[in-house]
């Protein structure tokens, strides 16, 4: 990438192109140094954390699950966005280690919550494309579940449409294997990717996650809102017609929530209900008497 930019800059006397090459090099260098920092963070452990965002069952209004989201507080740069962490990890071999770390950490916290009297929840963990393609994924996940004594049914892996569409035949086989192991599957950011409806019915998944971009304008006035309302409703109906559950993410307002509930959306997740929070905060909210107990690191 940097080589290519340099090549283009050499060939061209165009100022803009030179500037562009500069930026590319700076970005490549930044990535490289972040990669080293992430490697150290993984070895050391205390800069990284998993936060949880609680999901709610619309019918009962009770917590039904929690999505694990990786957090990294860099010693000099401060908080690094999750999307950057994943991009840096995917550009290197670190994604395997990071993915394992997130899964272990999420299940360790959940096992601790359960010991403290927390009711059963669905723990949602995001998978990256690299992890999904990795052979032995199911065995690895099952062994971590066993290690923490968590039933496979309490874990939901989140995948995206593009991960599934990259190699449909392989995806179908992998989803079957994950599903047979008792682990749940969800399609994240549903509606934003290139999804084929004819494959959707062959993908063994349990739930669709309506992307937050369609939730954003719900309950507002105007054309954007109308279009998003049509899409959100269509995803809910499509999911239900295929026998799948539907959850909406990014719910920030009462109006968005009312619309989703009226359309029969099964669960919701968003700032209106809960932000992603450290494990001990979540435990304190779920089991008030257990608050103040930090649990596993
Ligand atoms: P995602 O899986 O779709 O996660 C939802 C994102 O939306 C999270 O951002 C969450 O903090 C944010 N969010 C939740 N509720 C609201 C809301 O009401 N309004 C708005 N505006 N945003 C909301 P986050 O934590 O920055 O993560 C971004 C993305 O990074 C995730 O999108 C996921 O694709 C990826 N990611 C995060 N953690 C992990 C991880 O452990 N492994 C992998 N492979 N990917 C991860
Ligand atoms: Mg997700
Ligand atoms: Mg999402
Ligand atoms: Mg997303």
Image (cartoon, rainbow, N blue to C red):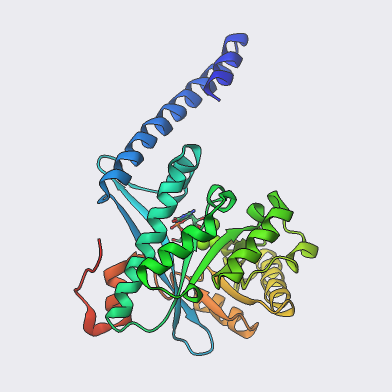
Does residue 264 sit above or below 227 in this rendering? below
Q: Name the image quarter holding residue 286.
A: bottom left
In the displayed structure, 297 sits above or below 232; it is: above
Horizontally, residue 62 falls left or right of residue 204, namely: left
Q: Looking at the figure, which quarter contains the N terminus?
A: top right
Identify which residue is drawn at 78% across, 64% down: 197
Q: Is residue 11 left or right of residue 24?
A: right
Residue located at (69% from left, 54% from top): 170
Q: Residue at x 32, y 37 (%)?
A: 37
Q: Is residue 4 above or below residue 61?
A: above
Q: Position of residue 69 (x, y in %)?
A: 42, 60
Whether residue 186 is visible to the viewer of this picture, yes or no, is no
Q: Quadrant of ligand 4?
A: bottom right
Q: Residue at the left extreme?
A: 292
Across and down, in percent, residue 83 comes to 47, 49
Residue pictured at 34% horizontal, 39% vertical: 39
Q: Which one is nearer the viewer's eye here, 254 or 150?
A: 150
Task: Specify the quadrant that holds the C terminus.
Answer: bottom left
What x and y, as percent, mark residue 262? 62, 85
Q: From this viewpoint, is residue 55 visible?
A: yes
Q: From the top left corner, tell me how far across and down residue 173 is, in percent.
A: 68, 60
Quarter of the figure with residue 204: bottom right
Q: Residue most toward the right? A: 198
Q: Is residue 151 above or below residue 16?
A: below
* Residue located farthest toward the bottom when viewing the structure as drawn: 60
Say how many tags the image has.
0
Q: Nearer the viewer, residue 260 or 95?
A: 95
């Amino acid at each position: 990438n940097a080589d290519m930019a340099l090549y283009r800059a050499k060939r061209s006397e165009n100022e803009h192109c030179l500037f562009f090459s500069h930026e590319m090099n700076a970005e490549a260098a930044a990535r490289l140094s972040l990669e080293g920092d992430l490697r150290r963070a993984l070895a050391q452990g205390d800069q990284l954390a998993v936060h949880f965002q609680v999901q709610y069952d619309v019918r009962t209004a009770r917590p039904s699950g929690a999505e694990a989201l990786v957090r990294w507080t860099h010693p000099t740069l401060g908080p690094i966005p999750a999307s950057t962490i994943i991009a840096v990890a995917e550009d290197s071999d670190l994604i395997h280690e990071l993915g394992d770390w997130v899964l272990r950490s999420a299940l360790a916290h959940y096992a601790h919550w359960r010991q403290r009297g927390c009711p059963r929840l669905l723990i949602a963990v995001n998978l990256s494309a690299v992890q999904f393609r990795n052979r032995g994924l199911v065995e690895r996940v099952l062994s971590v579940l066993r290690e923490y004594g968590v039933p496979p049914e309490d874990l939901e892996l989140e995948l995206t449409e593009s991960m599934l569409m990259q190699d449909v035949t392989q995806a179908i086989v992998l989803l079957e294997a994950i599903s047979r192991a008792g682990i749940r599957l969800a399609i994240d950011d549903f509606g934003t990717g290139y999804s084929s409806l004819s494959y959707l019915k062959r993908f063994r998944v349990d739930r669709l996650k309506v992307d937050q971009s369609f939730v954003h304008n719900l309950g507002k006035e105007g054309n954007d809102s109308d279009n998003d309302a049509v899409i959100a409703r269509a995803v809910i109906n499509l999911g239900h017609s295929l026998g799948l559950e539907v959850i909406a993410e990014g719910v920030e307002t009462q109006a968005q929530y009312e619309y989703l509930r009226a359309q029969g959306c099964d669960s919701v997740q968003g700032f209106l209900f809960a932000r992603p929070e450290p494990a001990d905060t979540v435990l304190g909210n779920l089991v008030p008497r257990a608050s103040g107990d930090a649990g596993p690191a």
